[in-house]
Amino acid sequence: MTHSIRTLGMFAIVATLIIFTGFAQGWDLALVILNMGLISAIMSLGVNLQWGIAGLFNVGIMGFVALGGMAVMLTSVPPVTEAWAAGGARALLALVIGAATIVGAVVLWKSTRNRWLVLLVMVVGMIVYRMVRDPGVDAIEAVNPAGTGYLGGLGLPVWIGWMVGGLLAAGAAWIIGKTALGLRSDYLAIATLGISEIIIAVMKNEEWLTRGVKNVTGLPRPVPDPIVLQNDPAFVERAASFGLEPTAASTLYIKLSYGVMFAVVLVILLVLAQLALKSPWGRMMRAIRDNETSARAMGKNVTYRHLQVFILGSAICGIAGAMMTTLDGQLIPTSYQPLRYTFLIWVMVIVGGSGNNLGAVLGGFLIWFLWVQVEVVGPGIMTWVTGWLPAESWLRGHLMDSVQHMRLLTMGVILLLVLRFSPRGLLPER
């Protein structure tokens, strides 16, 4: 079987599974799987760029995804004018003071190497920062804390937030990369995980910026409001021609619209990733991945190239995070869990085929499909498996109580099977 036929066959199988879901379980669920599958494929593509092409072990994926989600909120939500009037200027001035303190300390250290002088600058800068920040933040959070209590955003179109999400994640990746990319791979993994946890902690606790655990709901969306569609006579008439109720038709229309937009973004990123992979730059990155020592001997700046690909991959994850927050219509900082945004994405890359962009996309669709379906059909399967046991059996009760863990069991079994029978993934790197 040639590589092209194998690739087409694998994608045909995934497409058939999603279509079969539409006929068997409803098109609403099928479109949910499709939309999140597209977003997962984009995340997987970004991680594959870092690991599969450059060999960078990044386990801080959720931090960049969260930054993308925050970018949508900061970009698209209308500004809260009362909060800005109460303390917005002081909060922004505090951020400037904090950044100036860090920059000043770095410049001073490079020029003088006097640790006591640097420490003095940091301490004074921190005191001034808190003196300016605390009153401003308290004033912002006191403005209607049940409904707002934060500054809001810029009120721009939501699709701009997708680009801002990529830029924000890229900026964070630059800072992290300048600090951690000189570390060995295992230390790099620990550093990226720790920094991503810091990002999540900031989002949870800085209520004046993101509302923290109170969440930001009702984010603007790039698709029509369902109520508007249901009150549109032309739309209702078209829905009736397909035998659909207005409510169901509006839901399917909105989800299908998201699917089209997400598919366009995925295709654009995939084409760019393929062009980069086949370019001299892509061949150089794979040479660095395979043998850093030889690449350094040939005059390549390995650390700089690693920084490049780390920024690009993180930016793609930021775009995916922004798209996911747009799809949800809300920003929930507590939902960014390592299980969903690190372990699952890594399973997608490994199962699909590390180093192969098409394999990463395939893994994103396939693993997300299984992740959703195990939750849907898992209780039924467990009921069938334990049907021969008496109703009062402790074993049956234990297995039925453990059904929520079938997702983890399924992912582990799939990963083991793929690593045993196809160690390089379903679509291995050529």
Image (spheres, rainbow, N blue to C red):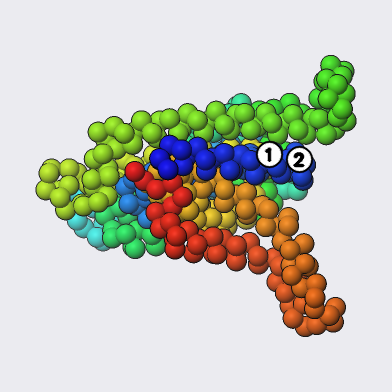
Total label count?
2
Instruction: Tell me the residue that label 2 is attached to.
Output: 23
Tag 2–tag 1 contact (CB < 8 Å): yes
Residue 98 horizontal side relative to residue 285, left or right: right
Query: Quarter holding the N terminus?
Result: top left
- Residue shown at 54%/64% (left/top)? 412
- Which residue, as the protein is rendered here, is positioned at the far front? 1
Rate crowding at label 2 as few (under 14), some (14 to 19) or many (20 or more) other CA atoms within 10 Å.
few
Location of residue 403 in the rendering, given as x and y in whole percent from the top left corner: 71, 67
Residue 426 horizontal side relative to residue 135, left or right: left
- Residue shown at 37%/50% (left/top)? 51
Q: Say what amino acid the circle numbered 1 marks.
A: Ile
Instruction: Tell me the residue that label 1 is attached to.
Output: 19
Q: Say what amino acid the circle numbered 2 marks.
A: Phe
- Residue shown at 71%/44% (left/top)? 21
Disc ID at residue 301: none
Look at the numbered disc 2 and give the secondary structure of its residue. Answer: helix
